[in-house]
Amino acid sequence: QSTPLTSFFNQPIIAHRASPTAHYSVQITLSPSAALDARQVNQYTLTLEATCPGETPANSQLFVQVHMVDGPPQCMARFASQVGELVQVPEDVAPLMPIYTVVLRRLASGLRFTIEDNDTPLTINRAGQVLAPGSGFIPAHAGQAFRLQILVTDRSGRNCSGAVTVRVLPVHHPRINFTAAWRSVAVLEKRGAMQLVTQVQAQGDNVRYEIIAPATHGLYTIDAVTGELRNTYELDLQRSPEVAHTQLLVRAYDMLHPSDSDTMGLNITVLPTNTLAPRCSPAVFLAQVPEDTPVGWTLATLTCTDPDARNSSLRYQVEGDQQSCYSFRMQGPQLQVNKTLDYDSAASARFQYVATILVTDSGQPPLSTRVPVLVTVTPKNEHPPVCPASNVFSVPEDAAFGDTVGRVNGTDLDYPFDNIEYSIAGGAGASPPAFYIGPRTGEIHVLGPLDYESKQVYILTVQLRDVANEVDPRHQRSVLCTITIRVQDTNDQPPRCTPPFQEFFIYSTRDPSQPLTQLQCSDEDESTVLPLTYTLVGGNSNGRFRLAGSTLLHSAFSYPPDSIRTFELLVEVMDSLSAPRHSTTATVVVHVTPWATTTPSTATTRTTLRKEPLVVTRIERFWAPSPWFVAVLTVSMALLLLTLAWLAWKLLCRPAPGKSAQPLLQDRALSDPHVAKNNAAPGELDKETDRASVLSLQEQFDGRAQDPITGQDYLFNSSTGARRWV
């Protein structure tokens, strides 16, 4: 808005003209863009002209003096507003070119202009001019806007501030460019019209495309926006051989700046269409190889040809699952082993590999032929069996027949895994052997009686032989393993007393405090750790004898003279208090002779029999089958007897072939007395007889068959069922 001059001079400035009828007044205001500087212009002379209708114009002059006012600087309203001034400059402005000048409403002496928080390439000089960067704007500044906060300060520190936004306008630069000057394109014939041949792309903005050479062409067209080149009609080399080779010049330009352009040449070649796929021999490949086939071994060589072109190059590739693709490879037309064909892999167990050989020619479009491949891997016995780590077993000496001692767990890395036969090659014990081994399970069983006291350790040599690990069953591997069997002692022997029978002669006056005898008994079983126990079990009448451990004592005797008393004492010696336990009985015979003296006698006569009793142990074995087994066996025998009886009856009732044939061949007509009276000759009589026999048989029987048992032919009547042997 305009500011009246009165606000600057504090008095009205009025131009007036008096007339008899009216008085006019004019108000003169200061322009908003005016900047008064008393140091440069201190007086303005204004010429005013007033014109009224029907009157002569009147002129007058107004002199405006500008006085220096010592006050704070005042910034212009738009510059000091929140939005600030907006300045637009091109990006190619000259370096240090003034872009904007700060204009104040009130000037002051000694002004200083600064840009607060300046992070822009712009600067300001002492005159308040905003300057372009010293090296000019860079391309990255194009399109950016820089906002400057400018502070104006006088000598007294009084200030005002404002904002200027400098927007850098981008300037177009030639940037249309093809990456290649020429391109060769091959396209197939007979694909139809408007088929995509190729697509050209140029770098730049607002790019458009056109074909500029040859000037007159109708074979190809290009999309101005996308650059896709298409054929306008079907390409046929037989009808139009000239379409085999075509050269085009394509121009790319900026739609807004057409002078910015670039060109690229296209060399288009039309190729004949590939119609026949390669042919290979053999068409299907089957092979059987052992698992130890080396890597790189050639399994088959394909013979493939391309009917379309004899000199066409063929590509070979193995297709199939991941396992088959990794197991085989193609070296040209040769199918080779790419990795070890392990038959003994527990994870995959791949015994057959199914793959396909893809043979592709170099025609357009490329055509392929697939050759199925089936490779069967046969096993190879590569590894011998391995003995187990644990080869020591223990068995009690009272183990029964068939009890399991332990199991030999041999291993074999060949498939089928751990398929091993076991046999004892030596060390099975004396004849008969004490142990046997299951041929398939490897379990060692007790075969004969064991006795710890006679033999404590058995060393067996077990042979491990693998089975069915190769196509040839004769190729087997074996290993010998040493197995140690320790016999554990058990309480199976009764105690033995030495001697088992004793006889003593004593007097009745013998001192009772003296022991009669001490039994010498022992036990051969090492497992018996408790001492032997002695018990009087017989012959101790009236309790005259007692035992203190193994010592036999007696009480005082009182017998009438001339009487002799004999005691036959039985002492049971037991080796254990819990099962299993064994005992033996020692016999002590004491003859007591009466003696009349008062002094007790200490003499004892001890008699030991030279012949010791012989202990015979006899084990009787018997078979006690289960009731169900007896029932099944009885029924089976009854059925067997019935079957034999039926067969015997059939054989006895069958007629003998020779005896049955003679009467059946006779004809009743021959025995007729009337026929015998015929006076014909003997030869004629025989012929007539044969004719009559044949006619009679034809009248009686209408079929012929063979007996299934004897194999002899016979005639039968289908109506009556009658039969006759032939």
Image (tube, helix red, strand yellow):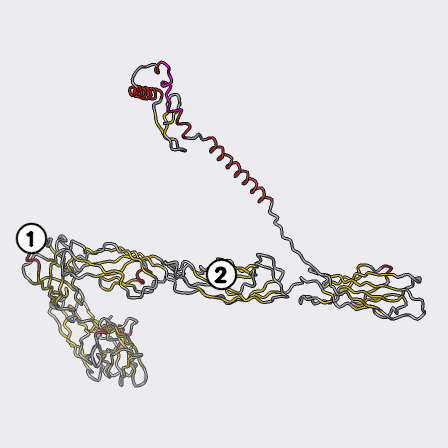
Residue type indicated by callout 2: Ser
Give 724 or 456, whichever is nearer the viewer.
724
Q: Is the magenta stretch mostly helix, strand or loop?
A: helix
Q: Say the numbered circle drawn on residue 423.
A: 2
Q: Give the x, y percent position of residue 627.
A: 60, 44
Residue nearer the viewer, 388 or 661: 661
Residue 451 versus residue 119: which sits nearer the camera? 451
Q: Is residue 78 visible?
A: yes
Residue type at mark 1 is: Arg
Q: Quadrant of the C terminus?
A: top left
The one nearer the camera, 67 or 602, is 602
Write down the region rendered in magenta: 663-673
Secondary structure under tag 1 reads loop
Work out which quarter of the rendered image holds the N terminus and state it.
bottom left
Find disc 1 in the rendering and name its residue: 239
Mark 1 closeness class: few <14, some 14–19, many ≥20 residues within 10 Å = few
